[in-house]
Image: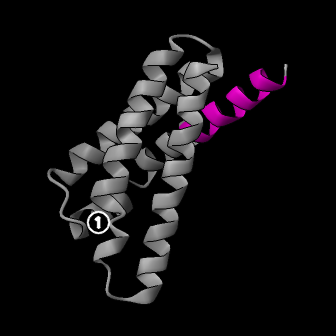
Amino acid sequence: MIKTILLILLGLFFILNGINHLVNTHIYEEYSVKRGLVSPRIMVQLSSIVLIFGGATLMFNFLIRYGVISLSIFLIIASFSLHQFWKEKDNQLKLLESMHFAKNMAILTELIYISYS
């Protein structure tokens, strides 16, 4: 029962993030441009689809492995292409990016745990 509730909450987290990517595409696009992402607008829109799909698979306990795989790929790409804290010279930006990177790695670890439990 607890695992089901936690999967629903985690799924909701990803779905809300996906919706946020759609609603605030311009903000994520600007951030992606600063980070040198290829085709920022398309990547933000694709990421929203991946986030919503992955979240829905967790929330509805359907095709979870596909959702975990897609969310894991998203988290790896986002972490290493957008949150490159090791390249930041400004200490505040370095701290902010390292926190985003660490958060993504923690969520990735959780997803891997989910897929093997």
Number of numbered markers? 1
Name which residue lies at 49% across and 51% down. 104
> Few, some or many C-alpha atoms within 10 Å of disc 1 (few <14, some 14-19, many ≥20)?
few
State left or right for residue 34 relative to residue 59.
left
Give the colour scheme of this rendering. one colour
| Residue furthest left as drawn | 38
- Position of residue 81 measured from the top left corner of the image (x, y, whole percent): 27, 56
* Amino acid type of the residue tagged 1 in the rendering: Glu
Magenta stretch: give its range: 2-14
Q: Secondary structure at mark 1?
A: helix
Q: Quadrant of residue 87?
A: bottom left
Main SS category, magenta section = helix
- Whether residue 13 appears in magenta in the rendering, the answer is yes
Task: Read off the residue under disc 1.
Answer: 30
Residue at screen point 29% across, 66% down: 30
Side of 72 relative to 33 (left or right): right
Which residue is pictured at 32% across the width and 80% down the height?
88
Viewer-closest of 12 and 112: 112
Residue that lies at the very extreme toward the bottom in this rendered image: 90
Q: Position of residue 113 (x, y in %)?
A: 59, 30
Q: Is residue 6 magenta?
A: yes
> Which quadrant of the structure image shows residue 1?
top right
Q: Position of residue 102 (x, y in %)?
A: 51, 59
Residue 23 visible, this angle: yes
Q: Nearer the viewer, residue 109 or 5?
A: 109
> Residue 115 location in percent, x, y?
55, 22
Depth check, front residue: 30 or 13: 13
Q: Give the vertical position of 87 relative to 99 (above or below).
A: below
